[in-house]
Image (spheres, helix red, strand yellow):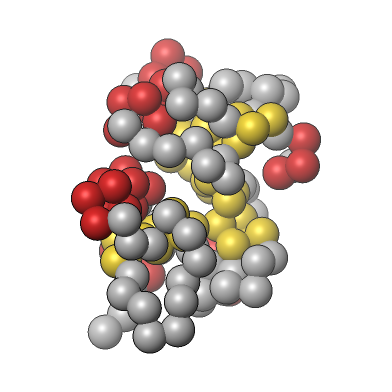
Amino acid sequence: MWDACEPATADQEYIERKRGLPDGLRVYRGPLKISGQVCAGSLVLPIRTLAGEVADLQFVILKANVVPGKPDKMLLPGVQVSRWPDACLTIGGPIKPKGMVYIVEGAGQAWSAHQATRRPAVCCFGVGRVEG
C-alpha cells in the first residue's frame, strides 16, 4: 500500500495546518475505508522499525472525510504496531549515536521540535509507547 501512495507536498491539508514538512510522507488516493472513513486524500505516515522496515501506516483523514465521533488518525486494520517496539517516524534526519533526539507523541510535535532545534525528532505514535 505504501508504494501505491504518491509523495506528499507542503500544501497537503494536515501538513499545512501543522506547518509541517512533507519529507518522506505520502498521500493515499485509493478506495480504502477504515472504520467507515474514506481514506482518499489522506496523508500517510510510515511507521518504520529502526532497521527501516515499514511496520504500519498512519492515515491522517481529511477533515471533510472524518466521521463524527471517530478519530482523524487511523492505523491499518488488523496491524498491531506493538509487535514492533522500535517502530516510529523520524523527522529531521537520521538518529546519530550519542546525538540528541527529541521523543514525542505525534508528527505535529516532531515537526515543531525539529523546526525549533534543527535536531531529529522521533514520533512514537502515542504516549503509551514511550517507556522510561
User: Which of the two residues, 67 or 113, is positioned nearer the viewer here?
Assistant: 113
Is there any visible trace of residue 128 in the rendered image?
no
Q: Quadrant of residue 125?
A: bottom left
Q: Position of residue 127 (x, y in %)?
A: 29, 64
Q: Position of residue 52 (x, y in %)?
A: 65, 66
Please tell me which residue is depicted at 22% across the width and 50% down the height of the picture. 116
User: Which of the two residues, 80 or 43, is positioned nearer the viewer here?
Assistant: 43
Please tell me which residue is depicted at 71% across the width and 44% down the height of the picture. 2
Position of the N terminus, as image quadrant, is top right
Whether residue 23 sits left or right of residue 127 in the image: it is right
Please tell me which residue is depicted at 57% across the width and 30% down the height of the picture. 8
Q: Position of residue 47 (x, y in %)?
A: 55, 57
Whether residue 93 sits left or right of residue 132 in the image: it is right
User: Which of the two residues, 117 or 61, is positioned nearer the viewer here?
Assistant: 117
Position of the C terminus, as image quadrant, is bottom left
Q: Relative to residue 128, is residue 21 depicted above or below?
A: above
Is there any visible trace of residue 22 in the rendered image?
yes
Q: Quadrant of residue 123?
A: bottom left
